[in-house]
């Protein structure tokens, strides 16, 4: 289960497309990704993007990026730009870039047509009255008193709505379908509402704006979308999607629904994410703990891993939740192959090699990536004073602790065997320095007499170490299903230790790390050099993911 091994997926949508191509119903596949530019894209969108773009690629088709910008107010050019950047970052490029707002004239002309056909009417009821007369799943709705207005009167009222004669909420245009339909979406849905509001693309030209259902299918139709892929919550909207196209007599794309992506611990509600940002609970939309694509990017997630994950989870017809361990497995899998290895000590304690000459420095060769022979080696300085990880030493070790302890010998990675011969302590009795001797015969990590050590630990030369800020992240929430907590409660499950900052001691080559570079700090985790906060000579690192693969363990248990 790695990126390379992932087979060409087959699923109900691809099957359907194969049939449509085979039968000649469709000559070339055209899909689209239609985000509303009212927020930043998140991991759920990565699935929708991967689905529509990959399917177009696989079938030699096209995929459009369409801004579903029919709601003035919440939408913004800033989001439009961010969406384009995020889609590109994932590795996809669109064939056409479109804006639903560019179809406002066409949509209006079509609305007039429906009115002329007696299939739409202007209603004076307010939103509450309309909701109250819609009925329930078990009872039919009731007709609006304005349902039987004449075509001429409807045309006049619609034109005056458009001209701005009425205030917000005073009138709506509704499709005249069936107030007793078992599908509530067909009970005379609203097509246009009045909103005297500036639109980021059309300015003040319009004061009536189309509802999602009235805009979406027609936009798909205009662009010649063949397969309009969307999430399951739109399934009950499909009959309306079809009704609008059929009533207008225009080309009708095929809408197909698939399950939303949900991942444990990750929250994908735009509204709640906004509360996190506005409340200062995170440091913005690109905070590395956020499930936004910019957050994941800044955390160091490789885009290839997100795409591989989205492809692996595939397309289902039932919503479910994936373990975060699976997502992290894909991140680790990619980084294992590509990230350069470095040595860094994040919780340092001093180790002094008593039989190493005071000023002597030896540069030892260290492999950059054992998984990639082309990654080569680098030289790392080794000296008398080293930093090692505090947890790699225990003064009174339990039986199953194999690392450094008084009288014990371990291997220093790429260096020598060292043996602990004593410790220095402060007044409180805490160990401050570990005293060792080294065996010059063990250079490169093996003893000529064949004696073994049970542990290899990492280290950094104290005289050469680079101090750097390292940010350690955990899940943002303490509960795996944050979506199950409503807006008033979900802040109570924020993890108070989701971000911890330490100053690490890094091998000197890390000084020149560039923003955007990914590393494995050996035996610790994968880290990303932050492009935003790093300064020349003073890099800042984010922990992307630890080395422990919980998903592999789950799999092995299952075997
Ligand atoms: P909103 O709450 O604003 O409607 P949204 O998450 O639906 O948010 P859109 O910008 O409308 O955001 O979504 C664009 C596309 O991404 C839609 O086709 C939607 O179905 C899809 N999408 C959104 N969330 C997910 C998800 N979790 N999994 C898969 N696809 C998703
Ligand atoms: Mg939406």
Image (spheres, helix red, strand yellow):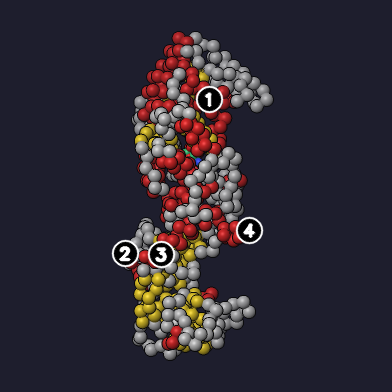
Q: Nearer the viewer, mark 1 or mark 2?
A: 1
Write down the residue under mark 3.
372
Write down the residue under mark 1.
240
Q: Name which residue lies at 49% across and 9% down.
A: 150
Q: Name which residue lies at 44% across and 82% down.
A: 416
Q: Earlier in the sequence, mark 1 or mark 3?
A: 1
Mark 1 is surrounded, within 10 Å at the Cα level, by few (under 14), some (14 to 19) or many (20 or more) other residues, namely many
Helix, strand or loop under label 4: loop
Mark 3 is surrounded, within 10 Å at the Cα level, by few (under 14), some (14 to 19) or many (20 or more) other residues, namely some
Q: Which of marks 2 and 4 is nearer the N terminus?
A: 2
Residue 8 is situated, as x and y percent measured from the top left of the image, at 48, 46
Write down the residue under mark 2.
536
**Badge number at residue 460:** none
Q: Is residue 274 left or right of residue 136?
A: left
Q: How far apart are marks 1 and 2 (CA)?
A: 57 Å
Q: In the displayed structure, would residue 115 be above or below residue 291?
A: above
Write down the residue under mark 4.
559
Q: Which of marks 4 and 1 is nearer the N terminus?
A: 1
- Is label 3 within 8 A of ligand 1 (CB to nearest ligand atom)? no
Q: In this view, does 28 lie to the left or right of 236?
A: left
Pick out the residue farthest to the left: 536
Q: Which of marks 3 and 2 is nearer the N terminus?
A: 3
Q: Which of 258 and 272 is in front in this view?
A: 258
Pick out the residue farthest to the front: 22
For the residues labelled 1 and 3, say whether their Cβ atoms are less than 8 Å apart: no
Q: How far apart are marks 3 and 2 (CA)?
A: 28 Å
Q: Distance between the residues labelled 2 and 4?
A: 49 Å
């Amino acid at each position: 289960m790695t990126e390379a091994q992932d087979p060409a997926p087959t699923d109900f949508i691809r099957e359907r497309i194969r049939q449509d191509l085979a039968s000649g119903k469709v000559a070339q596949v055209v899909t689209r990704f239609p985000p509303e530019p009212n927020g930043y894209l998140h991991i759920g969108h990565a699935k929708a993007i991967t689905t529509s773009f990959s399917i177009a690629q696989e079938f030699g088709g096209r995929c459009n990026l369409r801004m579903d910008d029919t709601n003035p107010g919440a939408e913004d050019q800033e989001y439009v730009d961010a969406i384009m950047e995020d889609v590109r970052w994932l590795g996809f490029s669109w064939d056409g870039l479109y804006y639903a707002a560019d179809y406002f004239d066409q949509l209006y002309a079509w609305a007039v047509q429906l009115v002329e056909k007696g299939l739409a009417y202007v209603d004076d009821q307010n939103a509450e009255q309309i909701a109250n007369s819609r009925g329930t799943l078990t009872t039919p709705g009731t007709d609006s008193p304005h349902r039987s207005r004449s075509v001429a009167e409807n045309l006049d009222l619609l034109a005056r709505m458009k001209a701005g004669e009425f205030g917000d909420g005073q009138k709506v245009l509704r499709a005249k379908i069936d107030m007793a339909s078992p599908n509530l979406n067909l009970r005379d849905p609203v097509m246009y509402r009045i909103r005297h509001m500036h639109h980021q693309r059309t300015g003040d030209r319009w004061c009536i704006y189309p509802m999602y259902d009235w805009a979406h299918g027609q936009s798909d139709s205009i662009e010649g979308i063949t397969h309009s892929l969307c999430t399951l919550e739109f399934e009950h909207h499909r009959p309306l999607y079809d009704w609008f196209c059929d009533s207008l007599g225009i080309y009708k794309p095929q809408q197909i629904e698939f399950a939303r992506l949900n991942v444990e611990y990750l929250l994908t509600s735009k509204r709640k994410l906004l509360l996190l940002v506005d409340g200062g609970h995170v440091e913005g939309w690109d905070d590395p703990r956020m499930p936004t694509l910019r957050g994941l990017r800044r955390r160091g997630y490789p885009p290839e891993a997100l795409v591989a994950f989205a492809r692996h989870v595939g397309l289902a017809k039932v919503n479910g939740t994936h373990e975060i361990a699976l997502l992290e497995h894909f991140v680790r899998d990619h980084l294992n192959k590509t990230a350069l290895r470095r040595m860094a000590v994040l919780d340092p304690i001093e180790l002094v090699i008593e039989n190493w000459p005071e000023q002597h420095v030896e540069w030892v060769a260290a492999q950059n990536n054992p998984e990639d022979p082309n990654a080569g080696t680098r030289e790392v300085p080794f000296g008398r004073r080293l930093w090692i990880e505090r947890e790699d030493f225990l003064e009174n070790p339990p039986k199953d602790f194999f690392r450094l302890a008084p009288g014990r010998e371990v291997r220093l990675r790429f260096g020598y065997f060292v043996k602990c011969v004593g410790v220095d302590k402060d007044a409180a009795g805490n160990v401050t320095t570990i005293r060792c001797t080294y065996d010059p015969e063990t250079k490169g990590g093996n003893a000529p007499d064949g004696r073994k050590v049970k542990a290899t630990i990492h280290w950094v030369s104290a005289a050469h170490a680079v101090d750097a800020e390292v940010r350690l992240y955990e899940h943002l929430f303490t509960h795996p299903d944050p979506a199950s907590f409503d807006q008033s409660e979900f802040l109570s499950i924020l993890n108070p230790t989701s971000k911890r900052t330490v100053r690490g001691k890094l091998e000197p080559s890390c000084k020149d790390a560039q923003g955007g570079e990914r590393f494995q700090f050996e035996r610790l985790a994968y880290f990303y050099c932050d492009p935003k906060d790093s300064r020349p000579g003073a890099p800042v690192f984010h922990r992307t993911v630890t080395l422990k693969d919980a998903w592999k363990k789950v799999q092995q248990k299952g075997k």
